[in-house]
Amino acid sequence: MKYAVLFEQTATGYSAHVPDLPGCVAAGSTLVETTDLIRRAIVLHLAGMREDGDPIPEARTIAEYIVAA
């Protein structure tokens, strides 16, 4: 399944979260590291949901950059 991930630059690096998977977050010192960590976090989050018998949420978030003139 494909989920939207939002990345934010922080004072110490980057953070990421998955809006469609509440509680699925990661943080790292570089964007590359944070991307790898959030990918792993998604896999673990979904595995935990399956183990608990929770339904897997559909990916519903749509991200888009809008240019404001």
Image (cartoon, grey):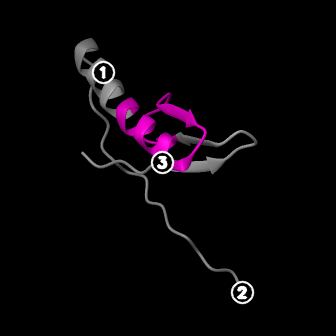
Residue 42 placement, left or right of 28: left
Q: Quadrant of residue 15?
A: top right
Seen at 52% across and 40% down, the residue is 17
Mark 3 vs mark 1, CA separation in Å: 26 Å
Q: Horizontal and vertical percent for residue 5?
A: 46, 48
Residue 64 placement, left or right of 60: right
Secondary-structure class at tag 3: helix
Q: Label 1: which residue?
A: 49
Q: Label 2: which residue?
A: 69
Q: Are marks 3 and 1 in contact (CB under 8 Å)?
A: no
Q: Which residues are magenta?
A: 17-41
Q: Are marks 1 and 2 in contact (CB under 8 Å)?
A: no
Seen at 46% across and 31% down, the residue is 24
From this view, report whether residue 47 is shown above or below residue 27. above
| Amino acid marked by disc 3 | Val
Q: If you read the primary sequence from the N terminus, does the residue marked by circle 3 or circle 1 appear first?
A: 3
Q: Considering depth in this image, is 12 or 20 the residue closer to the camera?
A: 12
Q: Are marks 3 and 2 in contact (CB under 8 Å)?
A: no
Q: Label 3: which residue?
A: 32
- Most extreme residue toward the right is 11
| Amino acid marked by disc 1 | Met
On-image quarter of the N terminus: top left
